[in-house]
Image: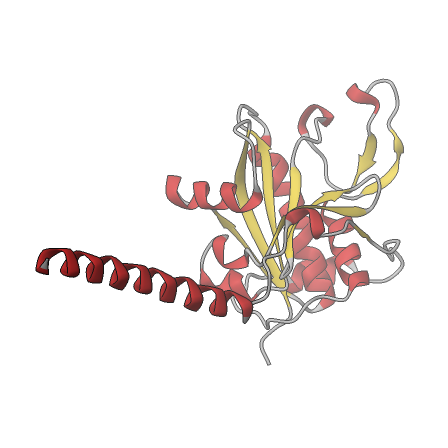
């Protein structure tokens, strides 16, 4: 009889503990914002790039430098559009028949005109892919992934551009270098801080690939953080 009572008590106590955990979990979740699904992020149509301003080239070269410190403040949409256009935007129509692919001309060259480097744009609200032809950002992942890309200073940058290429591309290193220099010169012209860096080791590369929702055929190569100088 005593064992039966003890068993019933144990079951009751276990049930009460489970119920208490469930209630506390529900209360905690009720107080937290619901997670944003990637599908809930809308594409961003960027304003037409303003190509009329900027610093003279020789002055921009004189001011080009790397700075690993940023103010956690978003770039105006016009500035973001200008930045991405300067990086690898479309600056002329389809190239002539002597160039393979018949693709539109871009602000940075690529070997064999492959144009295979993709710009993954990491903002505070999510990760997007830059569509140069449409001048827009296509969402691929929701949430702030800035701290998952590169070293800690990137967590405060207004934008981090991750250069993604095919896993078997032999020209991606030099192609990325052309784009990265364009970003540096734009940052110098606009008084922004910029920092180009490699993704070191399998662990850091895998973390970046997961944050960007990359498939097995593409790899993150380098990243470049851009933002306002600290106050």
> What percent of the width, then of the height, locates residue 21?
37, 64
Q: In this rendering, would 72 be left or right of 128? A: left
Question: Which quarter shows the N terminus?
Answer: bottom left
Residue positioned 21% across, 58% down in the render: 8
> What percent of the width, then of the height, locates residue 188?
68, 63
165 relative to 52, above or below: above
Question: Which quarter shows the C terminus?
Answer: bottom right
Classify residue 187 by image quadrant: bottom right
Q: In this rendering, would 68 be left or right of 118? A: left
Query: Of residues 163 and 51, which is closer to you in this image?
Result: 163
Query: Of residues 37 and 161, which is closer to you in this image?
Result: 37
Q: In this rendering, would 138 be left or right of 16? A: right
**Please, which residue is most extreme toward the bottom here?**
231
Residue positioned 47% across, 69% down in the render: 28
> How many numbered callouts?
0
Classify residue 179 by image quadrant: top right
């Amino acid at each position: 009889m005593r064992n039966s009572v003890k068993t019933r008590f144990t079951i009751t106590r276990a049930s009460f503990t489970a119920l208490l955990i469930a209630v506390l979990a529900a209360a905690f979740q009720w107080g937290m914002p619901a997670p944003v699904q990637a599908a809930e992020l809308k594409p961003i149509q960027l304003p037409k790039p303003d190509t009329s301003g900027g610093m003279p080239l020789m002055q921009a070269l004189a001011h080009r430098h790397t700075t690993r410190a940023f103010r956690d403040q978003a770039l105006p949409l016009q500035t973001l559009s200008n930045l991405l256009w300067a990086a690898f935007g479309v600056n002329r129509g389809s190239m002539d028949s002597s160039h393979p692919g018949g693709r539109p001309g871009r602000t940075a060259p690529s070997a064999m005109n492959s144009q295979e480097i993709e710009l993954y744009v990491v903002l505070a609200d999510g990760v997007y892919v830059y569509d140069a032809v449409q001048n827009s950002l296509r969402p691929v992942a929701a949430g702030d992934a800035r701290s998952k890309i590169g070293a800690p200073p990137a967590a405060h940058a207004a934008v981090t551009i991750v250069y993604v290429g095919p896993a078997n591309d032999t020209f991606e290193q030099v192609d990325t270098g052309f784009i990265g220099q364009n970003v540096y010169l734009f940052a110098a012209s606009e008084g922004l801080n910029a920092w180009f860096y490699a993704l070191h080791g399998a662990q850091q590369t895998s973390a970046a690939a997961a944050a960007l929702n990359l498939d097995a055929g593409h790899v993150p190569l380098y990243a470049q953080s851009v933002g306002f100088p600290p106050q």
